Structure formats: C-alpha cells, structure tokens
Image: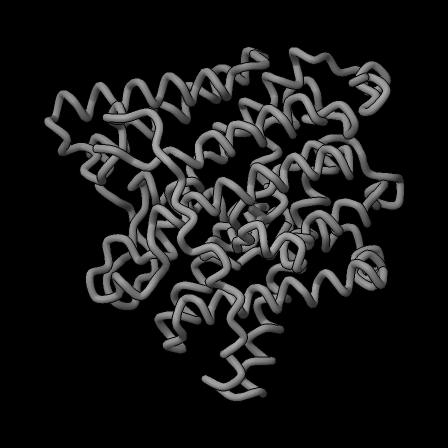
Amino acid sequence: MLERCFGLARAGATVGGEIRGGLTTFMVMAYIIFVNPAILGFAGIPALQGQGPPFAATQASTCLVAGVMTIAMGLVANYPLALASGMGLNAAVAYQLVAGMKLPWQAAMGVVLLEGLVITVLVVTGLREAIMKAIPASLKQAIGVGIGLFILFIGLNASGIVKPGPPGVPVTLGVLTSAPVAVALFGLLLVLWFQSRGMTAGLLLGIFATTILAMIVNAWTGGRAFPLPGQAVIPKTLTAWPDFSSLGSGVDLSVFARVGVITAVVTIFSIMLSDFFDTMGTVIGVGAEGGWLTPEGDLPRLNRVLLVDSLPPCPVLRAGGGHRPRTGHRARPHPRRLPHDGARAPDSLRRSRGRISRPPHRGPHAVHLLHHRWHRGGLRLLLRDQAPAG
C-alpha cells in the first residue's frame, strides 16, 4: 500500500529511512512548540504580558496545525515538507500588530486569517504558481539563502552566542564563557563531526547528546544555567490535556474598524507579501537540495504544495480550531493560515532540509505518510499535550 501510494522504491527510499528522517526533522523543528507561544505571548516582557494569547492554548494550536498540515502535505503533495509556525511572521504579529498597532491578539490573528484567504485565492486561480515560475531561479535561491541565515541568527541568539548590543549597535557577541554557549558550541561541533563522518543519523544523535548534556549542566548548576521554566529539565508530568480554549477566537475581522480600511489593507498586504516569498524561498531551497527541481528550476506538483500551504484559513478548517502558527516554513508552521485560535500561520519548513540531506530525500518517499506525515505529523499531535514543566 505504501509503495502504491508514495512510490518509495521508485524514489530509492525505505520505510526505516523515512522514519529516521521524519524523527530528525521533528527534532530539528520541535523548538517551535515552545518558542511560538513564547513570542506571541510576550514571555519575559512584563510590560506586554497579558496582551498575547495564552501560552498553553497557543502551544496546543501550534502542535495541532503543524501535525495536521504536515500529514496533509505528505498525502496531497507527496513531498517531505514540514509545516509549522514561521519564526518571523509570529514576531511581526506580536510586535507590529499587537504591541505596535495596539490590536487585540484576536484582531491580529484575524489579519493573518485574511492574509491566508488572499493567498488561497491566488493558489486556486493559479496566479501564485505563475508568479513563482516567472521569478528567476537565482532570485528564488537567494531567498532560500536569506531564510537560512535568518534561522541561523535565531539559533545564535537563542544560544547566547550573540545578543542585542547597546544603543546604535544591533548585535554583539554574547558571554562566550557561559554554560548555554558552551553547550550550544558542543552540539554544533558534534553535529559537524557526525556529518563529516557521513553518519545518516548524525543530526538526530547530535540533538539527543546536546539535550542530555544541557540537562546535566542545568542540574549541576542548580537550574541557573537554563533558568527558563521547562528548559533542560525532565518534565514533572509527561501528559496533559491540550488547551483549546482559544479555538475560534481568531475569526475576528475588527481590524478594519480599529485602524481604518486603508491601513488594514496595507497591513494585510505586507504580511501576505512576507508569507508569499517566505514559502517560495523554502520550497525552492529544499527542492534543490532534494534534487526534485526541473532543469528550469521549477518544482513538480508545485500547485499542490502551495494549496496545502495556504489551506488552513478555509472555513471547513476554521471550525476545527484553526490557528495561525506562522508557518511554521518554513512553518514557516510555515499551511499558512489558521489563526483562528491564536497560533500563527505555518510555513513549509526550511527545517525540512535537516532531513533532506539524509538518505530518503526524494519527493514521494520522503515522509510520505509513514514518516513525514504520520511519523512527524503524529509526533507533533502527541506533543500538543506537552507543556514545559519545571
């Protein structure tokens, strides 16, 4: 059945390889489960806390949409592309729409919903695919490079290797002798060594080893090395009921009344533009690395990928608890709209590259159902019940 549906053998893939690839991709993108609700909820910023959606509800939405849409990508498009909240537009929603324009978070999610509906119309009419094909391949590849550098910067900042500088200096080196930086560098060097040795599970092993080291260091320092709740510790409980209390809250179109029609339209367009090119760079970058592109630089079955990427805003999904994981992918989420419960539109994830570079990296076989869709998507659905427990 798997062979008939996904063509594993034809693509040179195996079930075991797909499962390993899906698990690796999940581990690479799992940080979104906690970072997305932290950004949207203004965690660590006392002056803004309470203005964003609840952490637990956003976390559940992030996992639900990422799991469902990642599975859909495998079933509909037959590509190993993961979808989850995007680590760029969620910041734009939080700091531009909520903190800057003073919109309630429900109205901000409404902006994401409208932006997603616009992109869905562009996909259905074929205009989005036509625009992507009209852009030179070199420019599309450059977008992917930019997205990769952005994700790299997120990692450097989260690990403490770099930090915001004094006024007038956007970024400076962090405290390179601190425990978090030492753990991050250890993990980075370990993964590089694994990859230089040609280990297919090197990335996954590096993540596991670095996580264990972080937990040991945190316990040794009495929790001072990683002070955030739930970080680098063994959870007190392994399961909990997901919080879907914010379901449907993002179906809020009051942005037009709050800021005016012209401002609302410009805001929706700016978010849509970012979303549009975000997916373009991700799809082309991952497709090139996976060897799926045609000689002209186009991706076969592109319209299916774009349709799944833009589907969440549809009414039929809205009732199921849409969420706007920012798509997360790159997605990201990076499925895109689904703001109805306070997540963010998912992206086709650039993190998908984490597994593309490993054995199964052809369209049909990768994740396709087994690993990427069921395995990775299922892991996200299971983890929707996990909240950080210190």
Query: What x and y, as percent, mark residue 246?
Result: 42, 56
- Residue drawn at x 41%, y 26% is 188
Place of residue 36 in the rendered image (x, y in percent of width and height, measured from the top left): 42, 48
Residue 350, image x, y percentages = 59, 41
Q: Position of residue 211 (x, y in %)?
A: 34, 23
The furthest residue to the right? 295
| 74 shown above or below 153 | above
Residue 271, by quadrant, is bottom right
For the C terminus, the quadrant is: top left
Choose between 285 and 67: the one closer to the eye. Answer: 67
- Residue 326: tell me if it is visible: no
Residue found 69% across the figure and 13% down from its top: 15
Report the quarter where the N terminus lies. Answer: top right
**Which residue appears at 74% of the width and 37% of the height?**
288
In the image, 47 versus 176, the foreground residue is 47
Determine which quarter of the picture holds residue 272. bottom right
Residue situated in front as seen by the camera: 381 or 111: 381
Q: Is residue 14 above or below residue 233?
A: above
Scheme of image coloration: one colour
Q: Can residue 335 be seen at all in this image of the molecule?
A: yes
